[in-house]
Image (cartoon, coloured by chain):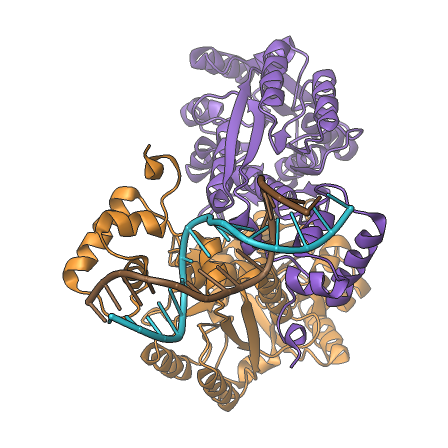
Chain colours: A orange, B purple, C cyan, D brown
Amino acid sequence: MQKASNKTPTVFDVADLAGVSRGTVDRVLYGRGRVSHETREKVLSAISTLNYIPNSHASQLASRKEYLFCCLIPEYSKGEYWEYMNTGFLEAAKDFSSYSLKLEIYYYNQNDVASFVENSRKILESSPSGVIMNAVFRDEVSLFAHKLEEKGIPYAFVDNKIDELDYILYHGVDPYKSGALGAYLLTARNEVKDILMVRLKRDSRHKADPNRPRRHGFTDYVEDHFPQCRIHTIFIDPEDSEGTMHEMEAFARKNPDVHHIVMTNSRVFLLVDYLKKHPDPQRIVVGFDDLDKNLDAVRDGLVDCLVTRHISQQSYSSLTSFAEFVILGRKPRHRNHFVHMDILTKMNFDNY
Amino acid sequence: MQKASNKTPTVFDVADLAGVSRGTVDRVLYGRGRVSHETREKVLSAISTLNYIPNSHASQLASRKEYLFCCLIPEYSKGEYWEYMNTGFLEAAKDFSSYSLKLEIYYYNQNDVASFVENSRKILESSPSGVIMNAVFRDEVSLFAHKLEEKGIPYAFVDNKIDELDYILYHGVDPYKSGALGAYLLTARNEVKDILMVRLKRDSRHKADPNRPRRHGFTDYVEDHFPQCRIHTIFIDPEDSEGTMHEMEAFARKNPDVHHIVMTNSRVFLLVDYLKKHPDPQRIVVGFDDLDKNLDAVRDGLVDCLVTRHISQQSYSSLTSFAEFVILGRKPRHRNHFVHMDILTKMNFDNY
DNA sequence: CTGAAAGCGCTAACAA
DNA sequence: TTGTTAGCGCTTTCAG
């Protein structure tokens, strides 16, 4: 009676076939301790002929290992983009709690490099099993990444990345393309005259501008397809809704022909007061990202189109794929995971 | 030294606190064998005070249980809608293979009730742990569902459902809304005159017409928003590409003003030959579902818009959530999972 | 109706 | 460098 043939092979079967002990098999599988080249080969071949796949449940049960994952992301206020990211990470961690995965999220100030550095130092100290971050401060992120590499700690990027680095995984949209898509949606409907692009005041102040590629995607598309079209830009302060109203009204007074409005950051919702107060049947407004307030604006017919993807889903799958790699050793299918961009209108925004 | 307080509680802790043995705890947890009411209560209270959560890995390891899931779906040819569904099921099964889940997919002929009945009989015989199906033949599906209920076998629906039944889960889009979305996309761009709706000959032959709700969503939208607009219908035979060409050409000859074309089934790709042969800059074509051939048509600029969602992803999550419920006992968040409808244009179809 | 005990497949500490 | 062995937490006979 052949036992091995019938049921899925175990370490035991492998050890038998290779003529070694279970312990040795384990050693070659996970590279713990030294194994002679010869035995190594024998074990490896036994594994492949038996088509052995370790039982993850048994493994999980036996090793009371705890996995600590650290995320390093921008701090945020309620309802902002990174809150959704945060939610996705939390959910992923919950779904992996049976693998005793602990999650620690560190928040840095996007306007303060020092806070990034300080937090990265803390993370290094806690020697986690993996790190996920976004890449705003080019130099500091690189430095941090190199330190992680030295300690053998794998890391992944969300949202944006630094191509030269040896990251395990990246999840994000192609920001340039998303900008172009926004331009397409803004201009496809009817005759375009000029376009108003509303930006945030802080963009003009500090150098780290995460929205630049998206903006370029937008402007390039417009230049290519509507060379005669001019893009006006005004800057508003997210904290100052009255000021926003004034800026917008002033612009409209001076440029009564401009009916196309875009915001390439995630905060079109900042315009709702203005849009509500000054209805314009010819107006088309395009924004980005599925913040609740943006969705509300779409529902209310104030914003026509949102270019987005599930923000929280993106961070969710970032952490789950990364954890599967680190804990279960599953190689991700693609290193760069470009998330699909959804188009949201009032016709299809529910169930989103 | 308190052991229990520090680490996550185990059956052992529960048994201790309740003053019974591990076996008994197991019995009350999973209702195997009889337990006196009194002990039952004790165990239950111990569980809740300790906040005990069974370790799924240990459980999985100890019970060499195998789970058989059966899917009952329409048979298909290469490249058709249900092939994508099939793929999603297969992938889900692979990802759950560590839970020793076996998957058997049964295929019935959509034009032949008897084949549905026959296959449902086979499934009943194999007494699976769960069944997933779509609901085309109302009466027969209900009958089958009741038999499953009798045997205590849980079942889930994909794509469409029968509301009255006691299914565990449903995954699908709202077909009516998807039709309306298609109509919106077809008509939003520019002046609509009349619309050509292309349907499949078989639709007119047999009664089970899975596309009716979507079609109604489409026509209702058009009637509401463009009452003067007439929807012409022609029927083509999917097997007969020459005939299709002729039908289309004949229609175009008679109705040179009609530039808006829609197919509410998943096969707009059947029109590509015609569309390629007779270019029309004013033309707008809208289709449904992300078959590869449809995506090709979008890439080639022959079809403007596709209303869809990831077909295979839908079946994937159908099986995974269902399996999580059956195997791990995780209650799904929503019983009815309405999948979001994506809008695909040439600007955003890559990475889909 | 309840308890005791032998594993499930793997890991890790300890010997050799 | 390699083998041995005691568990990980739970399920499941088999006795009682």
- Quadrant of res A238: bottom right
Extreme-left residue of the structure:
A38
Where in the figure is residue B118, as x and y percent of width and height?
60, 13
Left or right placement of residue A53 versus residue B270 in this view: left
Residue depicted at 35% across the width and 37% down the height: A3
Where in the figure is residue A185, as x and y percent of width and height?
57, 51
Q: Nearer the viewer, residue A9 or B174?
A: A9
Q: Nearer the viewer, residue A51 or B138?
A: A51
Residue depicted at 64% across the width and 32% down the height: B159
**Residue A223 makes an appearance in the image:** no
Extreme-right residue of the structure:
B38
- Quadrant of res A247: bottom right
Figure check: B346 above or below A166: above
- Quadrant of res B229: top right
**Residue B113 makes an appearance in the image:** yes
Residue depicted at 66% across the width and 29% down the height: B193
How many numbered callouts?
0
Left or right placement of residue B82 versus residue B22 in this view: left
Left or right placement of residue B237 versus residue A153 in this view: right
Q: Nearer the viewer, residue B14 or B286?
A: B14
Q: Nearer the viewer, residue B48 or A321?
A: B48
Where in the figure is residue A210, as x and y percent of width and height?
50, 73
